[in-house]
Image: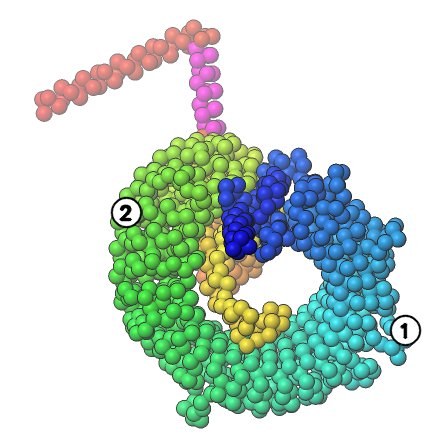
Amino acid sequence: MEAKSLWVLLTTLLFIIQGWRQIEGCLEQERIALFQLKSFFNDSNWVDVKGSNCCEWEGVECNVTSERVIGLDLGFKRQWDNREWISDPYGYLNVSLFLPFEELKSLDLSGNEIADLVDNQVSVSSAFNKLETLVLTQNYFNDSILSKLKSLTNLKTLELNFNSIKSLRQFQGEKAQPMINLEVLNLDYNSLNNNDLAYLKGLSSLRSLSIGGNQLEGSVGITELLDTLSNLEELDMGGNELKEFVPIKNKENESLGKLKVANLNGVFNNGTASLIQLLETFSSVNTIYLRGNYFNDTFSTQDELQVSSKIEELVLDRSSLNNDILQSIGALASLKILSLSGCGLSGTLPTQGWCDLRKFEVLDLSENALKGTLPSCLANLSSLHYLDISGNQFVGKGVSIGLANLTLLRFISLSRNLFEVPSIFISFANHSHLKVLSSNQNKLVEEPTIPKWVPKFQLKAFRLSNCTTKELQTEIPKFLYYQNNLSIIDLSYNNFGGKVPFWLLENNTRMEAFLMKGNSFMGHLNLPSHPNPNISFVDISDNKIQGPIPANICSIFPQLNGLNLAGNSLQGNIPPCLGSLTTWNLLLDLSHNQLSGGIPEMLAQSDSLRFLRLSNNHLSGKITPTIFCSTSLRLLYLDGNNFDGNIPSIDISTFLSYSLVDMDLSNNNLSGELPRWIWNVSNLNALAVSNNQLKGLIPMELCYLDSLRILDLSENNFSGPIPSCFGPQSIIHLHLSKNRLSGTLTNAFFNSSSLVTLDLSENQLSGEIPYQIGTLSALSVLLLKANYFIGEIPIEICKLYSLSIIDLSQNKLFGLIPSCLSRLTLDPNGEKSLTKTYWEGSGGIFERGNYFGLTEFEFFTLRGGESFDVGFEIENQMEEKVDYTTKRASYTYKGNILEYMSGIDFSCNRLTGEIPIEIGNLSEIRSLNLSHNNLTGHIPSTFSKLKQIESLDLSHNNLIGRIPSQLTELYTLAVFNVSHNNLSGSIPSPKAQFGTFDESSYVENPFLCGPPLHKNCSDLDSPLTTAPNTSNNEEESGLMDKYVFWVTFFVSYVIVLLVIVLILYINPYWRLAWFSFVEHCIKTCQYFLLQFSIFKRSG
């Protein structure tokens, strides 16, 4: 009885102890040690809450039984502000902090800027005596780290890639073998050289060695290396600068030990290595990667390999080869996988060599220039289950004998060729194993009515997008009626008509992505009758669908992750249920429709919504404040609607995190001032509120948005000065035009090295254009039109070599045109139209562990996984636009057109002097407007070099001389205007573009003659002698500068007046006579007026 009681007592005690251990989790000393580590790894989210189990903390792994810490993932857990980084960018980690973790086996310290492990108090071997895996990637360790680590005898995996190690000499110096159990060593991207290979000889257990991206060069003795590393199975030397591997001396024993995989990507770049010799040297390995190399020889029928090769996998993507390799590759009899993607192959496929490799399982010939039909010998590759011939110029229609016999195919890509689809698909009728069929960008033709065929396959993925077609296709491929296992279908951009084929969702209940973008589907959205719980992405944008969005869309697609219905004619309200979708990262695009009402409150409250685009609809009312309170929403586009009222005020200081990156409220009827909370969104990248009725000052808080790249406040009623502190380093496009801004530009903007577009047009800005404008090194578009700027054009503008669009028109600028403008290159600049500040992708459809019937190698190493990218990518939707006047009209430039546009507009100012002849060196300029100034001199003949010019306006100046006849060589010139000048002589012959200009281009030039003017040049012998006497005054006025005339007249008048006064002052007699004469005149006038008034009365 006592023994039984004692047993119950012990059992109860053990239960209590075990329960206490479960509550406490890891040991107390290990919990304390973890918080001591937090002082160094300050980005960890560990919280010391009493009773919490630290084994459940992020990055902490414990033994299930002992609950001792056995693994720590501290990668990228150290943060500091910029001031700390500048003063001390490196970290020194004291290894004594790890002493309490007696059972630690795995430690990841990558990406923490650690320069060394401090071992003053305790050695590294004591702190890490049981460590098996150590990851020190992307730090600042140098050679000394090796001497501290080499005594870790239990270490099996060591990753030191992306550090500052220059030598492995530290491995030597002791009798004990360093790291005798080490199996995996990664030394990629350090500064090691050939001599360091000798220091690896003690690592006898090493199975995998990565030493890519170092400074290895010249010749490497592969056999000597492998003799010292007898257990090595994988070798990665990619990214070095080698010339060759020293061939095996004893060809009777050609083995390279246990080596199975060799990665030599990007190693041979100078064209001296021999591919034939290389394959002979590595003939005993199973897999060899040779991507991105440049060899000095090619295969030919005379130079076939003279060795019995064991190579089974050969990857030569993006290496320089020609078609000869396909003829002689047959010598590699064991070859199962061959990838020649992007190798520059051209012409037709040969019928010998490669067709004899009956063990072929994988063949990738994509991204070459191969053409013609597929040879019938392709049928010999009966074991082939993966074939990628995309990105070539193959042709074919109907049954292909070569393809029809490859019945084991699981994956086939015919994309970006010239096949006639869907007729070519009949070749796969008997391919019962086929899972992926990709045929994008081929020739879409009407499917023949006969023969009818029923496929034996059930596809997982079918891609048929962007095919060329001449007419509306009324029916999608018929074989799809027999498919019931599809996960993804893509029929985008094919001009298919009729109703949306929702029957595909009825037949394929496992469908995850339904992509029908850019067709001509019409009618209503008649969704399937039963829910489809697997569908994640639905894209039916850019079609002709009408009617409302069904209210039951959320119950039919309960796991919807992305919905794109943009570019249709949908009407009615937005279904509130879209806010009830709980899938993470919800992407919703309903833009460019005719939707009405407001934003449903349920949608605004969604915790899953990450992207919302409702642009260009008929939505109205006030914007609900809730939409701005979402902590998950990153991209918000409400532009092009009828929203009114103030932008709601909210308090974001209460949010733990605020995700908003882009916000576009342009083209609405919003009023009031910008709320202050906007300027507290520290991660805001883009803000656009143009074309509203907003008012008030631009707040000073704008200066503190360090992430801001796009700001558009144009076409509002903002007033006051531009904040002088403004100058965020990140801003790219700034639009403040068409407001009532005033003041000068003394300190604004000129601290930004990233500013590409500066648009301050149509404001009330004054003062001179500051010389500091020359500091805006990235500036490409400068628009200061219609302000009150005075002074000269600063020559510092010539330092802006990226500048391509300049509009300084309608100001009060004077002085000369800087001749240094000829230094501008005006080259096309993609930065002008670049607005991408954020990218959100779907990640594609992914079936973990199975890969939809493909192998992991086919799915990841090759491009098989691309077939499951749904393409539901959301980028920043703000399109950069620039308004510029040319060809007598104002145009809005955007996209690629903006990228190539270049022009200078100095019109409507007070510029003087001659037009610099150097302007003729701007060969890339497309528009030049110098009209309505006071320019003099001749039109430079160098303008004939403006070969891209489309509009040239020099009207309303004081130019003289002839129009250069060389201008007739400007074949792109569409608008030419020299009217209202003093030009003379005959107009150039009306050939080429000059034959298209009418009389308005030349009017008000008195001595200009010839067609299209109605003035014959033979009637004008000389402009100075043929003018009639009655028009002498007009002639002088026309030939003399008006400004000079009035100055001369005024000075002469003053001088004459002073002379008369002086004479009268000196001679009293003349003075008396003058006053008598004046008095006589006055009396005579009085008498005359008196007599005239009496006569009027008597009359």
Residue visible at 57% across and 75% down?
854
Viewer-proximal residue among 3 and 397 = 3
Asked if residue 284 can be seen in this view, the reply is yes
The residue identified by callout 2 is 622
Question: Which of marks 1 and 2 precedes in the sequence?
Answer: 1
The residue identified by callout 1 is 249
Q: Residues within 10 Å of mark 2 (few under 14, many from 20)?
A: some
Would residue 640 be found to the left or right of residue 791 on screen? left
Which three-letter amino acid code belongs to the residue tagged 2? Lys
The colouring scheme, among rainbow, by chain, secondary structure or one colour, is rainbow
Viewer-proximal residue among 998 and 661 = 661
Would residue 236 be found to the left or right of residue 570 on screen? right
- Taking the view exactly as shown, the residue that stands out farthest to the front is 1
Viewer-proximal residue among 654 and 1048 = 654
Query: How many callouts does the rendering have?
Result: 2
The picture places residue 779, in percent across and down from the top left corner, at 55, 45
The picture places residue 306, in percent across and down from the top left corner, at 83, 82
Compared with residue 221, is residue 916 higher up or lower down, i.e. above or below? above
